[in-house]
Image (cartoon, rainbow, N blue to C red):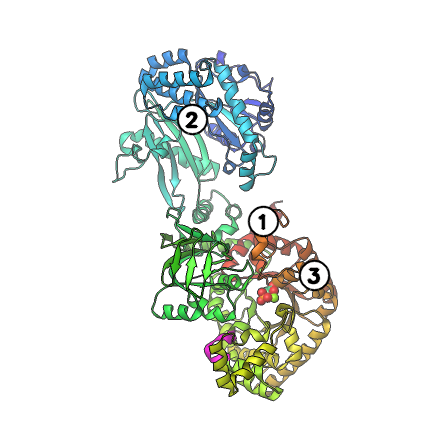
């Protein structure tokens, strides 16, 4: 192309910039595509001549201020065909579709017919007329899609259809064509729907759009002509694999849309390949892609054209990637020395990690959605429907995976949950019982599926479209998306491979806040260790009392008339508790284990149905009517605000005495043959200093007695859960009696809002949709209200006791935004469900790195 055609207009208009190695092009002003093309130009790759329009210019075009077309057209030889593509700051935010072959008109058609043949020239022109008619002139798409002729006939049919619909001939002047295309694309970006769509992908309200105008490298014509895309990795696995397609006589991404006509890139037993057809071009493409990986420091997908055997690189975008692909790509780039470990850590989205830890429904699987609810615990599982815990156990005994379907779960269901493959409930939200236990067990769970019918008495589950599913029917719970699916879709396995472990160890090197796990059982503790938690931050002890051999002495203890009777029942429970703790301590091998003393209202342990009442009457040797009356008498109007937590420690102190003894004896036993154990004992639901003082005195006395009896010494620490607003406000004096304070943000959120954590799921979606809450506060810590109380608690707690250790152990401990808040507030560690530990480790690492990098 003679240089006389290229009038360098940069000096006149800085917003229309020819992309050269030194042109002033930047992602925040011209978008990612423009910047990437400049990088490719710098690498001397065969990129067609391209002009970039800045965000500001495009915004002005949308307002009607289009720059003189000559400013752009002057950069190209007369008669050059052009394309316009979007260039937003982040390619993931999308943008209007590209328009190809601008400049085609009756005159250029004749020229191109001579050069590349009438057939190819007709296809180019027809494609432009159709795209222009539908996207720019906004004519009825059906009229053009119905044209079934091709070649010159197709072209004249398309031109006639245009003239009839638009009531004017197809514009011939390239300046008019280009102006209209630019205006349409600029306006499309500013439309409300497009704005909302990109905001949903994380774009700021005022995100700008750049455009690039590029000389067409034709994929049609004589010799080997065509187009395609190529990348060096598999997007799903992140493993090296040349993927993509190539198609003869095609443009844009047609190769991806026409699988049957497209060629493979590498030699492939399934069909012909570009490697066989045009080996030189294929080698060149691979070399270009490798160079891009090295120098652009990312796995790129390249869009290319082959024009009469010559390769052109039109574009490069970062490859699309699944969470597991993203992690492996980042690790390989760092291991190859292309990026630093820190950069690799910043390139993976923490929330995406939880998808790696569980089986998932395959992205390719067909989804027959029969209901949806809150995605309470990630992962997917298929099984046969069961409607109660006993059936779940029976099913497990037969070796059949089952899905436990309940209205909501209670501690009595925990045994069933342990053996179920997944849980589905009608009620509940992110911190309801099923959700908390499900996450702890790594059990896929969907709760609050209120759009399904739960006819438990009829053993019937009814889908949102009225289909009936009975006990034994197979369904799939997708706890990642919140969907319930009929049948058994294809799954992909968890990906806890070497790449995962390497990556997580880099995260641990970077982070500066501790991560522990909430773990109640040996299985939880083993999972916590597997995910490299630094200890147990919360062991809820109440679940331990539901096992068959424990529930009866537990109930006898609850029914005891005198402290002595109570002690006798507790003495039967003590060895079992001691065994629980010894096992936990052994698994954790000297790491800190924080055991929370009994928390729930006692009547949760009493039977609710007739058969249970009868069994209890038998065990206690009492008439059923007596037992029923006493169970009723124990009912509370507001159990979550009633006789629970440390209040039991004051009113029924024998329970905590027994638990303290079990902890201390287990400490001695586990320390004998393993690493020394220093248990942490935690009091729930504290609201007053005096509660701590009283309970502490008793626990110290138990410790002294055990030391005496066993002739062995041990250390322990005693702390409190801060989960009432009053405990935050009075943290100064409470801290004087505590070695540590752990914010129980589930209850603290419940009490700060006066919002039941078990019922909020019913209306939370209205609140979030109408913008009353930006997010479910049980899911993401409310930084304003609950957060203010935490800050007060931290400040006053540290004032009262300079050496106090502070943590949070509510579900928020696994949420990246909430972790950011905790780190900022000066909290020492967060504790979350074992399966969220990796998410927390990465989120914490990214926070530290962001601060370091600035
Ligand atoms: C809490 O309230 O935040 C907490 C961790 O305890 P639980 O969920 O057992 O009430
Ligand atoms: Mg609590």
Residues under labels 3 and 1: Cα distance? 24 Å
Q: Which residue in the protein does label 2 denote? A: 141
Residues under labels 2 and 3: Cα distance? 63 Å
The image quadrant that residue 660 belongs to is: bottom right
Q: Which residue in the protein does label 3 denote? A: 794
**Which quadrant of the rendered structure holds the N terminus?**
top left
Mark 3 or 1, closer to the camera? 3
Residue 657 visible in rendering: yes
Q: Which residue in the protein does label 1 denote? A: 849
Mark 2 or 1, closer to the camera? 2
Residues under labels 2 and 1: Cα distance? 50 Å
Q: Identify the residue at image location x=50%, y=66%.
A: 409
Element marked by disc 1: helix
Element marked by disc 2: helix
Residue 664 visible in rendering: no
User: Residue 274, relative to residue 330: is it above or below?
Assistant: above
Query: Which x, y percent locates residue 531?
Result: 48, 61
Please tell me whether the stretch drawn in magenta is mainly helix, strand or loop.
helix
Q: Identify the residue at image location x=52%, y=45%.
A: 343
User: Residue 771, relative to residue 217: is it above or below?
Assistant: below
């Amino acid at each position: 192309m003679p240089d006389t055609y290229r009038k360098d207009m940069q000096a006149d208009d800085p917003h229309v910039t020819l992309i050269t190695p030194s042109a002033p092009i930047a992602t925040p002003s011209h978008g990612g595509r423009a910047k990437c093309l400049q990088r490719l130009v710098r690498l001397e790759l065969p990129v067609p001549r391209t002009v970039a329009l800045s965000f500001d210019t495009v915004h002005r075009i949308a307002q009607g201020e289009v720059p003189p077309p000559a400013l752009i057209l002057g950069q190209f030889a007369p008669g050059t065909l052009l394309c316009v593509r979007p260039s937003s700051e982040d390619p993931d935010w999308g943008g209007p579709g590209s328009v190809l072959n601008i400049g085609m008109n009756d005159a250029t058609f004749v020229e191109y017919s001579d050069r590349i043949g009438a057939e190819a020239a007709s296809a180019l022109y027809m494609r432009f007329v159709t795209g222009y008619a539908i996207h720019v002139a906004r004519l009825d798409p059906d009229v053009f899609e119905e044209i079934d002729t091709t070649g010159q006939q197709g072209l004249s049919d398309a031109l006639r259809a245009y003239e009839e619909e638009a009531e004017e001939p197809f514009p011939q002047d390239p300046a008019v064509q280009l102006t209209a295309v630019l205006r349409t694309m600029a306006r499309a970006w500013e439309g409300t729907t497009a704005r909302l769509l990109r905001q949903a992908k994380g774009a700021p309200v005022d995100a700008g759009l750049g455009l690039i105008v590029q000389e067409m490298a034709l994929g049609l014509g004589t010799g080997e002509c065509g187009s395609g895309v190529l990348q060096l990795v598999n997007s799903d696995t992140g493993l090296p694999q040349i993927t993509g397609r190539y198609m003869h006589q095609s443009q844009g991404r047609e190769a991806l849309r026409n699988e049957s006509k497209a060629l493979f890139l590498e030699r492939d037993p399934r069909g012909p390949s570009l490697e066989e057809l045009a080996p030189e071009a294929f080698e060149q493409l691979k070399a270009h892609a490798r160079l891009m990986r090295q120098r652009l420091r990312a796995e790129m997908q390249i869009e290319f054209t082959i024009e009469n055997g010559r390769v052109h690189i039109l574009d490069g975008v970062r490859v699309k990637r699944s969470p597991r692909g993203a992690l492996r790509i980042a690790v390989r780039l760092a291991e190859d020395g292309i990026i630093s470990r820190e950069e690799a850590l910043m390139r993976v989205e923490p929330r995406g990690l939880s998808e790696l830890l569980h089986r998932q429904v395959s992205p390719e699987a067909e989804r027959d959605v029969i209901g949806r609810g809150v995605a309470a615990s990630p992962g997917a599982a298929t099984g046969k429907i069961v409607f109660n815990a006993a059936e779940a156990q029976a099913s497990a005994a037969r070796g059949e995976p089952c899905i436990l379907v309940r209205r909501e779960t209670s501690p009595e269901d925990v045994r069933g949950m342990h053996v179920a493959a997944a849980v589905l409930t009608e009620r509940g939200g992110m911190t309801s019982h099923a959700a908390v236990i499900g996450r702890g067990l790594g059990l896929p769970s969907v709760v609050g599926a209120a759009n399904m019918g739960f006819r438990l008495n009829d053993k019937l589950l009814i889908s949102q479209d009225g289909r009936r599913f009975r006990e034994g029917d197979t369904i799939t719970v997708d706890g990642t998306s919140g969907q319930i699916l009929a049948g058994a879709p294809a799954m992909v396995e968890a990906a806890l491979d070497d790449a995962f472990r390497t990556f997580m160890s880099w995260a641990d090197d970077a982070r500066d806040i501790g991560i522990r796990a909430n773990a109640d059982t040996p299985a939880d503790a083993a999972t916590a260790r597997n995910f490299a938690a630094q200890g147990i931050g919360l062991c809820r002890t109440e679940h331990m009392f539901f096992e068959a051999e424990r529930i009866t002495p537990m109930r006898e203890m609850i029914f005891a008339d005198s402290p002595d009777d109570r002690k006798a029942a507790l003495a039967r429970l003590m060895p079992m508790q001691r065994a629980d703790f010894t096992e936990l301590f052994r698994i954790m091998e000297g790491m800190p284990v924080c055991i929370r003393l009994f928390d729930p209202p006692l009547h949760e342990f009493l039977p609710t149905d007739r058969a249970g009442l009868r069994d209890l009457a038998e065990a206690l040797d009492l008439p059923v009517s007596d037992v029923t009356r006493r169970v009723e008498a124990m009912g509370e109007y507001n159990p979550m605000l009633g006789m629970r937590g440390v209040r039991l420690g004051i009113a029924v102190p024998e329970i905590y005495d027994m638990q303290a003894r079990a902890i201390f004896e287990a400490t001695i036993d586990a320390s004998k043959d393993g690493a020394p154990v220093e248990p942490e004992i935690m009091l729930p639901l504290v609201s007053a200093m005096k509660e701590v003082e009283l309970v502490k005195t008793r626990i110290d006395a138990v410790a002294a007695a055990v030391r005496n009896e066993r002739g062995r010494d041990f250390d322990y620490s005693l702390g409190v859960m801060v989960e009432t607003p009053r405990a935050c406000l009075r943290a100064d004096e409470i801290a004087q009696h505590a070695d540590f304070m752990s914010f129980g943000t589930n209850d603290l959120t419940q009490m700060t809002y006066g919002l039941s954590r078990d019922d909020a799921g019913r209306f939370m979606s209205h609140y979030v949709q109408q913008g009353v809450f930006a997010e479910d506060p049980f899911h993401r810590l409310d930084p304003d209200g609950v957060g203010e109380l935490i800050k007060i608690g931290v400040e006053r707690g540290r004032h009262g006791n300079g050496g106090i250790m502070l943590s949070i152990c509510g579900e928020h401990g696994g949420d990246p935004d909430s972790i950011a808040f905790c780190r900022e507030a000066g909290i020492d560690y967060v504790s979350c469900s074992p399966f969220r530990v990796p998410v927390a480790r990465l989120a914490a690492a990214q926070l530290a790195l962001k601060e370091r990098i600035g």
